[in-house]
Image (cartoon, helix red, strand yellow):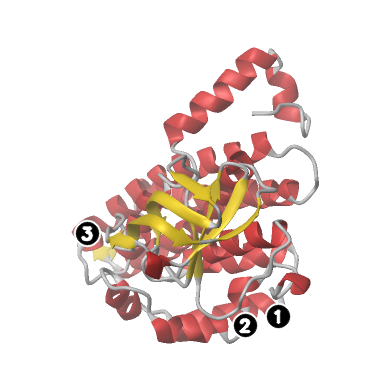
């Protein structure tokens, strides 16, 4: 484990327990928790120092996001990264301090003479952040949520997913150097990293529980059917992380990374469904209670399955590209063999 991973583990072990996750459920941003993470510069890992970030390699970003998933950290760490990455890619400068968020690509925002009009939907933490970054045609727009009419919403994990309506709001406009597809690829891969962390935590929690719980005079973890669930949980966590790590490296390679990116998110979505099912079945009724931390993880996995590409949409896209390319073997064996 690297020094960075050790520091992140200590921080989240100390600061993010089940009680903190419950406190954040249905609430806004936990300012004290964000400050603890921000004071170490963690939310800006992967953003060049020249643009106001903390620097670091993609492996450092992966380590951070895997840990946020594993500890169910109720903060917009991924959203902040994507927003800052877009701005830095456009030659802008980010501000370390309060979190930013990114709007999913949509065509409802228009920009005229430095002002923005339109509605941004399904913005994670939209009403709680300092800035929202959005693609608007060929432009990149940085907006202040205080200038919007906000309709609050929640995802399945109880975290904010807001709708913001702007009417002639002042906007910082930068040249759009990142396409909606590239944003979706990066968002999908990094969300898959978080999902791998949550799946690892589901395995860890389940493995501990089934050897503490006894029935018929022995731990339930010694029964073959329960051990089968443990195998599934371990497989889902490991294969998701390996796939996401490889896709993250491809994103930084300069090569077309569409296939590994979309495939990593598709795999994460599929594996999450297995992880959720096996985790809850091995726990029985206790896994469904709010007081027990399993649902901190499984509700996030269910919510994240819909982010940056659903299972159906990704499978359709990848399948259509494979059929059109007529090269299934090369897709499976050669890097960069297929653009999706």
Instruction: Residue under label 3, please give it.
Output: 288
Residue 235 appears anywhere in the view:
no
Tell me the SS state at disc 2.
Answer: helix
Instruction: Residue under label 2, please give it.
Output: 7
Q: Is residue 296 left or right of residue 131?
A: left
Marks 3 and 1 sit apart, C-alpha to C-alpha, by 36 Å
Q: Residues within 10 Å of mark 2 (few under 14, many from 20)?
A: few
Q: Residues within 10 Å of mark 3 (few under 14, many from 20)?
A: some
Determine which of the numbered discs, if any, sits on residue 3 in the image: 1
Q: 97 or 175, which is in the foreground?
A: 175
Determine which of the numbered discs, if any, sits on residue 268 in the image: none
Q: Earlier in the sequence, mark 3 or mark 2?
A: 2
Q: 256 or 286, which is in the foreground?
A: 256
Q: Residue at x 69, y 28 (%)?
A: 339
Do the CB atoms of the residues marked 2 and 1 lie less than 8 Å apart? yes
Residue 28 appears anywhere in the view:
yes
Q: Residue at x 55, y 53 (%)?
A: 113
Q: Residues within 10 Å of mark 1 (few under 14, many from 20)?
A: few
Marks 2 and 1 sit apart, C-alpha to C-alpha, by 6 Å
Q: 63 or 339, which is in the foreground?
A: 339
């Amino acid at each position: 484990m690297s020094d960075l991973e050790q520091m992140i583990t200590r921080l989240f072990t100390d600061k993010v327990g089940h009680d903190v996750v419950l406190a954040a459920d249905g609430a806004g941003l936990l300012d004290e928790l964000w400050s603890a993470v921000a004071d170490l510069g963690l939310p800006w890992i992967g953003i060049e120092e020249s643009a106001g970030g903390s620097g670091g390699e993609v492996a450092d970003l992966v380590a951070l996001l895997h840990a946020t998933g594993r500890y169910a950290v109720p903060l917009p760490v991924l959203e902040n990264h994507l927003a800052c990455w877009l701005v830095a890619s456009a030659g802008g400068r980010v501000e370390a301090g309060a979190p930013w968020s990114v709007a999913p690509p949509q065509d409802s925002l228009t920009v005229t003479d430095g002002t923005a009009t339109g509605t941004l939907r399904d913005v994670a933490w939209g009403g709680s952040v300092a800035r929202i970054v959005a693609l608007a045609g060929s432009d990149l727009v940085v907006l202040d949520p205080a200038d919007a009419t906000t309709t609050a919403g929640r995802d399945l994990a109880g975290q904010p997913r807001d709708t913001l309506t702007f009417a002639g709001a002042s906007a910082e406009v930068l040249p759009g150097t990142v396409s909606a597809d590239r944003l979706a690829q990066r968002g999908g891969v990094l969300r898959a990293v978080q999902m791998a962390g949550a799946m690892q935590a589901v395995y860890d929690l389940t493995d501990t529980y089934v050897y503490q719980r006894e029935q018929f005079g022995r731990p339930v973890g010694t029964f073959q059917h329960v051990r089968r669930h443990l195998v599934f949980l371990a497989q889902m966590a490991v294969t998701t992380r390996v796939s996401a790590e490889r896709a993250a490296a491809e994103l930084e390679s300069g090569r077309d990374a569409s296939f590994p990116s979309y495939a990593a998110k598709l795999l994460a979505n599929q594996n999450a469904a297995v992880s959720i099912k096996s985790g809850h079945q091995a726990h029985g009724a206790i896994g469904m209670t709010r007081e027990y931390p399993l649902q901190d993880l499984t509700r996030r996995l269910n919510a994240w399955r819909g982010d940056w590409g659903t299972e159906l949409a990704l499978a359709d896209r990848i399948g259509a590209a494979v059929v059109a390319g007529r090269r299934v073997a090369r897709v499976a064996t050669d890097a960069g063999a297929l653009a999706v």
